[in-house]
Image (cartoon, rainbow, N blue to C red):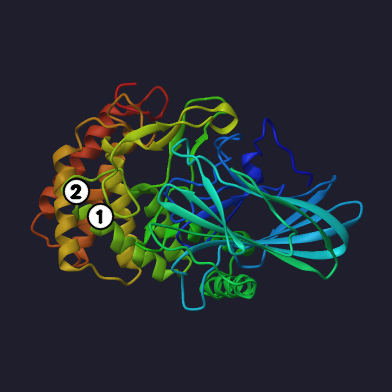
Amino acid sequence: MRPRREDGYAPIEDYAAIGDGRTVALVAADGCIDWWPVTRLDATPSFARLLDADRGGTIRLTPTEAYDVDRRYVEDTNVVETVFTTATGSVRVTDAIPMGRGGQLSWSQLVRRIDGVAGQVELEWSVEPGSRLGQCEPRLTRHDGAVVVELEEEMLAVQAWRLGEPDVSAHAIRGRVVTKAGNSAVLVITGGADSPVVVPTCEKCLVSVDVTIDRWQEWSRTIDYDGPWREVVRRSALALKLLAYSPTGAIAAAPTTSLPERIGGAKNWDYRFMWVRDAAFTIDAMLTLGLHDEAHAAVKWMLGALRETEPDLRVFYSLDGREPDGEHEADAAGYRNSKPVRVGNRAAKQTQLGTFGDLFDMLWLYVQDGHRLDRASARLLTNLADRCCDIWHTKGSGIWELQKTRHYTVEKIGCWTALDRAIQLADAGQLEKSNVKRWARERDRIKKWTNKHCWSDKRNSYTAWAGT
């Protein structure tokens, strides 16, 4: 492929995702890393050219002359290899967010390993920290072989080996190098928040890439699937694994905020939260693929988060289990001028009754997989089933998070599903049976009401909401 940009922005589909279970970075086809919240997936990004071509910040590594690109994930990993081919030669760039042999590193790091493949290629590189979505201006200083970048509470160390003498300005570190076949170089950014910054050696950084490849391939061997579209399914599992926030077990709906539904439009939402619905679907997929560790971690975390708001069921929760605290607009241009750029999501306080069905259906699948609910979780689910009985007849915002509340058909069906699965859980000995009669009575009322108010004889189908 030949990479392209429009007004400084790469096509969304040209990005590859890399990560380590805590954060995700996006690598464009032209070698620019345009999104990286350094310390955690839902942190304010220090590199966010994805949402602001001028001030967002990027980590650039690209040939100085015309080139073609061939990219792939290293087999069964979330490590990306990019081969740039010019008229004079080719060079391979391997991008990874490293993991240690014993698990996650206690610091955040991004390694770009450059290996000459054939002939020679001149590369230009830069590390250009952004404004953290308009929050601050970076401060750069030299320190014994590294350039230290300070961005509010975050501190980064930038190191380059065999990449030429860098030029350090007030806002960026830049350099050029000619790669030759058989030669290698390394660019590393290491960082943390409110903590000392690690300054590793070149050898440790090179080894960390190989270790990370081994760790991903070891994890991929736990995927229990040998059916149709095997490689596509495995790649999808690796993508879902990137959204599993390992410090808590929460599953993010997406690693980014404010990518537009339509270029230039305003439907740009922050999805760096755990949506109960999305997580339920993901847990279902994980159970199907035999990924029991991730599924159990997500279920445990979700039940813990739900206890903080019971008997109410929120649409989504922060990755650390807190209840989200609103939404504000960031001082950023937006992807191809798609404003606003949002931090947080105002749907946090919405009523989406269908979420009850997503939750209970997922937990029914979970226990069918051989697991058992503890007493505290059983009490929680009993209270939630009772709450569903109390409010199923009210209006909600639907799965589309619309501002106008209605009796959306899909929400009634979700409530029916929740009570039906609650009854099955009780029959299986997972919940107390004391409230089963009420659940069955309300389940049948939901079906009767929905068939009366949400069915169209004229169209011979259910309708979007009652009376339409």
The part of the image, by quadrant, that contains residue 169 is top right
| Residue 388 in picture, x, y percent from top left | 19, 44
Measured along the vertical axis of the image, is residue 311 above or below residue 238? above
Is 205 positioned to the left or the right of 464 in the image?
Answer: right
| Residue 465 in picture, x, y percent from top left | 33, 27
The residue positioned 29% from the left and 47% from the top of the image is 357
Question: Within 10 angstroms of label 1, few (less than 14), some, or many (20 or more) residues?
Answer: many
Q: Residue furthest bottom?
A: 102
Under mark 1, the amino acid is Ala
| Mark 1 element type | helix
| Residue 128 in picture, x, y percent from top left | 61, 46
| Mark 2 element type | loop
Q: Which residue is mark 2?
A: 309
Measured along the vertical axis of the image, is residue 302 above or below residue 264? below
Tell me the tag on residue 336: none
- Front residue of this view, candidates 171 and 463: 171
- Front residue of this view, candidates 30 and 235: 30
The residue positioned 54% from the left and 28% from the top of the image is 338
Measured along the vertical axis of the image, is residue 218 above or below residue 137? below
The answer to whether residue 60 of the structure is visible from this angle is no
Tell me the tag on residue 305: 1
Q: Mark 1 and mark 2 in contact (Cβ < 8 Å)?
A: yes
> On the rendered image, what quadrant is the C terminus found in?
top left
Is 377 positioned to the left or the right of 402 in the image?
Answer: left
The answer to whether residue 299 of the structure is visible from this angle is yes
